[in-house]
């Protein structure tokens, strides 16, 4: 009897408007919660799909980067802590290779040789590339032909360029000495004199890469508005003032990039030295990259060569950081 009475009271309470409203609200909140959860799930799946799509598009770049740059870099660091011969025999030696590198003077000597080459070539190649860009942008006959001729050497490999100039600088039958002999001037030992050997490498490298520098400057010149030059002409500005206050500031972003990459490329000089001078005369033109090559592949000291490569990589990162700081520093 009591159970039936309690059941009837409970049913009457459920029929009351208050409790029915509460039940409806509870059901509504449950449906909203389910929808929110479903929406969150769909949003997460959509986000995951976008991330996977981005990775799929980046995969053709990321996979070669990991295989041919990141993995060899990590492998080289690991080898630098070992004594590693040509037969693959390895022995952990800790920091012994780095100690040998830092206590000997050869590494820093050849590092200075590479830096010396940078000091020689970067101002020349930037100035000459800018000059050629200013000349070939003018409306002259055969303008496109001149641009192609100046750029053509850059499509050749460093080996081809080096062999061409090796013949040009030959002390007996080279074209340059033949011209000097025709003019009644004494022959020059281009590749066997320390000073002349460096300038021979500089000339060959400038001839090879100046066309690329010119093309980048041409692209920068096309971004400068002609209205600025027209306004300068109205004000009676001279050609020098137009170059100083319009052309040069307009080319500054391109010039910063050029300087950055030319310094990095100069520090990595190898092919021209290996083919044209073989590091000679003596070790006068031996660079840091060739020194690492000789240590690893001529002396079979791969552990020490890996340590040298690691130190050179750290040095390159420091150079890049310094360049970034100075080239991107805001000036008033």
Image (spheres, rainbow, N blue to C red):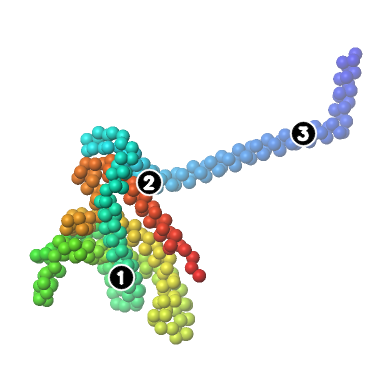
Disc 3: CA contacts within 10 A as few (<14), some (14-19) or many (>=20): few
Give the quarter of the figure containing the N terminus.
top right
Dot 3: element: helix
Dot 2: element: helix
Name the residue located 10 percent from the left edge and 76 percent from the top edge.
Answer: 184
Mark 1 or mark 3, earlier in chain: 3
Residue 180 vertical placement versus 44 (above, below): below
The numbered mark at residue 118 is: none
Left or right placement of residue 59 versus residue 165 in this view: right
Disc 1: CA contacts within 10 A as few (<14), some (14-19) or many (>=20): some
Among all residues in the image, which is located at the extreme front? 103
User: Are the residues tagged 1 and 3 within 8 Å (C-beta)?
Assistant: no
Q: CA distance from mark 1 to mark 3?
A: 80 Å
Residue 179 vertical placement versus 299 (above, below): below
Residue 86 vertical placement versus 114 (above, below): above
Give the residue number, with chain letter if any, for mark 1: 128
User: Are the residues tagged 1 and 2 within 8 Å (C-beta)?
Assistant: no
For residue 83, which quarter of the picture? top left
Q: CA distance from mark 1 to mark 2?
A: 34 Å
Residue 240 is situated, as x and y percent measured from the top left of the image, at 39, 80
Give the residue number, with chain letter if any, for mark 3: 26
Question: Which marked residue is nearer to the observer: mark 1 or mark 3?
Answer: 1
For residue 191, which quarter of the picture? bottom left
Question: Which marked residue is nearer to the observer: mark 1 or mark 2?
Answer: 1
Dot 1: element: helix
Give the residue number, with chain letter if any, for mark 2: 65
Name the residue located 33 percent from the left edge and 50 percent from the top edge.
Answer: 312
């Amino acid at each position: 009897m009591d159970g039936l009475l309690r059941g009837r009271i409970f049913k009457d309470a459920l029929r009351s408007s208050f409790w029915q409203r509460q039940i409806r609200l509870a059901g509504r909140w449950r449906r909203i919660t389910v929808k929110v959860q479903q929406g969150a799930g769909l949003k997460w799946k959509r986000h995951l799909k976008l991330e996977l799509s981005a990775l799929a598009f980046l995969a053709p770049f990321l996979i070669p980067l990991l295989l041919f740059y990141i993995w060899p870099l990590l492998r080289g660091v690991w080898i630098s802590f070992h004594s590693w011969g040509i037969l693959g025999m390895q022995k952990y030696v800790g920091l012994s290779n780095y100690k040998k590198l830092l206590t000997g003077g050869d590494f820093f000597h050849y590092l200075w040789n590479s830096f010396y080459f940078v000091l020689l070539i970067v101002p020349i190649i930037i100035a000459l590339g800018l000059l050629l860009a200013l000349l070939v942008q003018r409306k002259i006959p055969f303008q496109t032909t001149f641009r192609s001729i100046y750029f053509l050497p850059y499509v050749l490999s460093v080996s081809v360029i080096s062999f061409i100039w090796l013949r040009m600088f030959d002390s007996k039958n080279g074209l340059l000495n033949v011209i000097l002999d025709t003019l009644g001037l004494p022959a020059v030992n281009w590749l066997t004199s320390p000073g002349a050997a460096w300038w021979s490498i500089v000339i060959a490298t400038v001839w090879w890469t100046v066309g690329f520098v010119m093309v980048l400057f041409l692209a920068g010149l096309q971004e400068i508005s002609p209205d600025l030059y027209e306004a300068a002409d109205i004000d009676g500005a001279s050609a020098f003032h137009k170059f100083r206050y319009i052309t040069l500031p307009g080319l500054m972003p391109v010039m910063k990039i050029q300087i950055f990459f030319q310094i990095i490329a100069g520090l990595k000089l190898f092919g021209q030295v290996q083919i044209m001078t073989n590091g000679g005369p003596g070790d006068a033109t031996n660079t840091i990259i060739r020194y690492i090559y000789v240590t690893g592949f001529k002396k079979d000291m791969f552990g020490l060569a890996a340590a040298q490569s690691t130190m050179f990589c750290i040095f390159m990162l420091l150079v890049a950081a310094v360049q970034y700081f100075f080239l991107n520093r805001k000036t008033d």
